[in-house]
Image (cartoon, grey):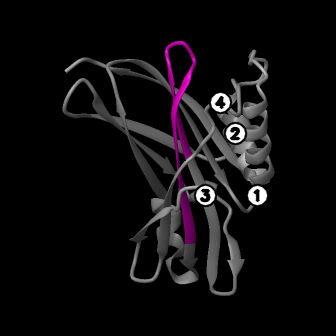
Amino acid sequence: MRPRPRLLTFFLSAICVFEISHQNILVAEPFPSPGSQQESRSSSADTQAKLSAAETPQDKKIRQAIYSRNDVQQLQVSMRAKLGQVDGDTRELTLVAHLDGKSIHLRNDGERNLNIVAFVFAVFDAKGKMLKVERRDAKVDVPNTSLQDFLSTGIDADVTFKLKPGAYVVRQVVIDSEESHMATAFHRVNVPPM
């Protein structure tokens, strides 16, 4: 059973609404990277079959993009990172992805311009093992009167991970629902000790 998404609503202007939903993605064992060796266990195979049956075509593209070694730049996306303090031996790593509003296609529905954009952040350790994955879905609903504002400001999505000091690789995947345009990139991040 998937966790229920948390919805956060942001207002660009008095009329333009973005809903960002928060989801944890369960992809650790059932979806090994292509070409990797994995022992076949009946419980693991059963889990994979159940998850694959519920997987949408967009989920499949996202999963493949997370493990791909190739970058795709069909959308203009940038990412910034910020380290924060946490109790104990972990630190907060906040990642913020910015999607340029001019690079996304919006479906015109009368007086509204619509799309849904998925922002996915996967954290891998230095050995290439996936540690955590987070997804944010941004529902874009922009009236024609606010379209120019949206095109100049774009969309931001952020996520915060608690990590121990060390070297990590962040895989960023951004995909829109209208044309399935995608942007992917690897980012090396070093979390220093406190």
Quadrant of the image for the C terminus? Answer: top left
Instruction: Depth check: give the residue in front, 15 or 9.
Output: 9
Q: Nearer the viewer, mark 1 or mark 4?
A: 4
Quadrant of the image for the N terminus? Answer: bottom right
Tell how many labels: 4
Residue 67, above or below 101: above
Name the outermost residue toward the bottom. Answer: 110
Q: Which residues are magenta?
A: 120-140
Q: Amino acid at mark 2?
A: Arg
The alpha-carbon separation of the residues under discs 1 and 4 comes to 29 Å
Q: Nearer the viewer, mark 2 or mark 1?
A: 2
Residue under label 2: 63
What percent of the width, then of the height, locates residue 8?
A: 42, 66
Tag on residue 29?
A: 4
Q: Secondary structure at mark 2?
A: helix
Q: Residue at x 53, y 64 (%)?
A: 151
What percent of the width, then of the height, locates residue 69?
A: 69, 23
Q: Nearer the viewer, mark 3 or mark 4?
A: 4
What percent of the width, then of the height, locates residue 164?
A: 33, 23
Specify which label sits upstream in the sequence, 2 or 1.
Answer: 2
